[in-house]
């Protein structure tokens, strides 16, 4: 890609108190109020080169949106082939669900098999660019695999903390990719506490969801891609399996940026957050009309990526859901397994339970009359089922 496309990244801004921070230093959350920091760009400058026409000339993958990504030095941009995933129309699935305009954004084809590659690609690239020596993550599995891959690519020591009952394939993957893996008796929140201790003791850089500002920038590229793939229209509805919520919040940010750059108009999809009925803090907060979500006690679900009892970006997710006219819905583990089979046998995509949760939600929302049969719906199939095969064996 030609050097004429410079990043238009200008600064970091707190999502809550709006304090601004120096973009050339490593940051986690806002030092003033503890909330997530967001990357801001000179969108007028970005719009001068990031046009519909210029995009047609660029290679596929997420780095094509260079102007609205935070990495400054091209040699720091790690490329394992992330992004550029297919948006598939799924006629047999559409028939089965009685919704002919059902689409699948198939994120399983990312490096390490999930959409987590997008976020960790940006987080590790930027940490590398800014001189981080070692990185650490608390993870339900897929994020750890992705971090390990990007860290391996630049030879950065990586430390993973996962709940002991995370599907075994994830620990195998991370170790094989060179990371140090510690299994923790507890939930992802307990793993987060271990990372925090490692940061204090060893000076690791923490790349936890939304406690690190650039994972969001990687995930937002799903929104850019979707618009491009739909010829700069957005669907009526996006259904997204929600844990920490970076994808949901990231796409919402992408739509605002695209509108500011004149790439799309004001129309927005209704954003649907899907959780497991064994861990649904965002659904409960949405239903109660709360701005923040309370911690979900005794979180339990086979969808390890959705077992997030508390999320630092809860208020950002709830804002996106409400502002879009969307909703939040919980589905059962049994439904996730059932719809993984439906998805697989009608589309050829082998999904993890998290992705399959979208279809279960779609069916409920159609039955409830919240969806119309002719709505254009995009389901995010966020990760491959290949790391969860034990769920089909019992
Ligand atoms: C396959 C899969 N889908 C969805 C999620 C939830 O993603 P987010 O934390 O961005 O809400 C995860 C998180 O681990 C995941 O692994």
Image: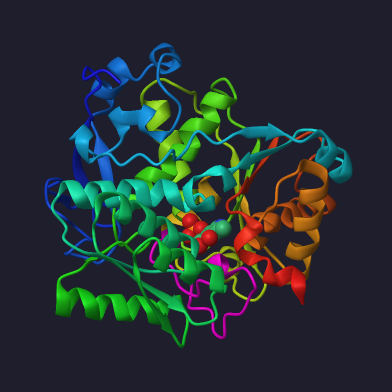
Q: Is residue 328 above or below residue 72?
A: below
Q: Could you tell me residue 148's position as x and y percent?
A: 37, 59
**Could you tell me which residue is drawn at 44 percent across and 75 percent down?**
162
Colouring style: rainbow
Please state which of residues 2 and 52 is positioned toward the viewer in this rendering. Answer: 2
Q: Is residue 61 above or below residue 371?
A: above
**Could you tell me which residue is drawn at 47 percent across and 47 percent down?**
111
**Could you tell me which residue is drawn at 23 percent across and 47 percent down?**
126
Q: Is residue 43 above or below residue 220?
A: above
Q: Quadrant of the N terminus?
A: top left
Is residue 308 magenta-colored? yes
Farthest residue toward the bottom? 185
Q: Is residue 203 left or right of residue 304?
A: left
Q: Could you tell me residue 304's position as x and y percent?
A: 57, 70
Region in magenta = 293-315
Q: Could you tell me residue 8's position as x and y percent?
A: 22, 30
Q: Could you tell me residue 375's position as x and y percent?
A: 74, 35
Q: Is residue 29 left or right of residue 261?
A: left
């Amino acid at each position: 890609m030609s050097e004429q496309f410079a990043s238009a990244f200008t600064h970091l801004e707190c999502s809550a108190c709006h304090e601004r921070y120096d973009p050339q230093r490593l940051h986690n959350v806002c030092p003033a109020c503890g909330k997530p920091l967001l990357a801001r760009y000179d969108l007028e400058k970005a719009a001068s080169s990031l046009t519909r026409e210029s995009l047609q000339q660029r290679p596929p993958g997420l780095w094509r949106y260079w102007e609205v990504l935070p990495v400054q030095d091209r040699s720091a941009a790690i490329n394992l082939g992330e992004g550029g995933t297919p948006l598939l129309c799924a006629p047999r699935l559409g028939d089965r669900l009685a919704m002919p305009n059902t689409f699948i954004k198939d994120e399983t084809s990312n490096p390490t098999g999930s959409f987590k590659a997008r976020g960790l690609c940006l987080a590790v690239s930027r940490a590398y660019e800014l001189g981080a020596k070692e990185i650490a993550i608390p993870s339900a599995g897929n994020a750890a695999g992705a971090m390990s891959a990007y860290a391996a690519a630049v030879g950065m020591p990586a430390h993973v903390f996962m709940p002991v009952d995370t599907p075994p394939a994830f620990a195998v993957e991370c170790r094989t990719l060179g990371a140090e893996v510690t299994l923790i008796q507890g939930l992802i929140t307990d793993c987060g506490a271990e990372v925090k201790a490692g940061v204090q003791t060893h000076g690791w850089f923490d790349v936890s969801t939304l406690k690190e500002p650039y994972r969001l920038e990687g995930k937002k590229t799903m929104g850019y891609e979707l618009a491009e793939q739909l010829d700069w229209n957005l669907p009526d509805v996006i259904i997204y399996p929600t844990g920490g919520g970076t994808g949901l919040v990231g796409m919402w940010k992408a739509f605002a940026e695209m509108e500011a750059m004149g790439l799309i108009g004001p129309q927005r999809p209704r954003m649907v957050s899907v959780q497991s009925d064994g861990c649904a803090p965002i659904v409960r907060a949405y239903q109660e009309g709360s701005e923040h979500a309370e911690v979900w006690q005794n979180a339990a679900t086979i969808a390890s990526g959705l077992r997030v009892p508390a999320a630092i970006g809860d208020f950002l997710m709830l804002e996106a859901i409400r502002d879009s006219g969307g909703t939040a819905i919980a589905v059962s583990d049994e439904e996730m397994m059932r719809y993984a089979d439906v998805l697989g046998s009608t589309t050829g995509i082998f999904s993890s339970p998290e992705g399959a949760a979208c279809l279960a939600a779609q069916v409920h929302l159609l039955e409830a009359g919240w969806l119309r049969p002719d709505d254009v719906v995009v389901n995010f199939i966020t990760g491959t089922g290949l790391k969860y095969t034990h769920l089909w064996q019992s």
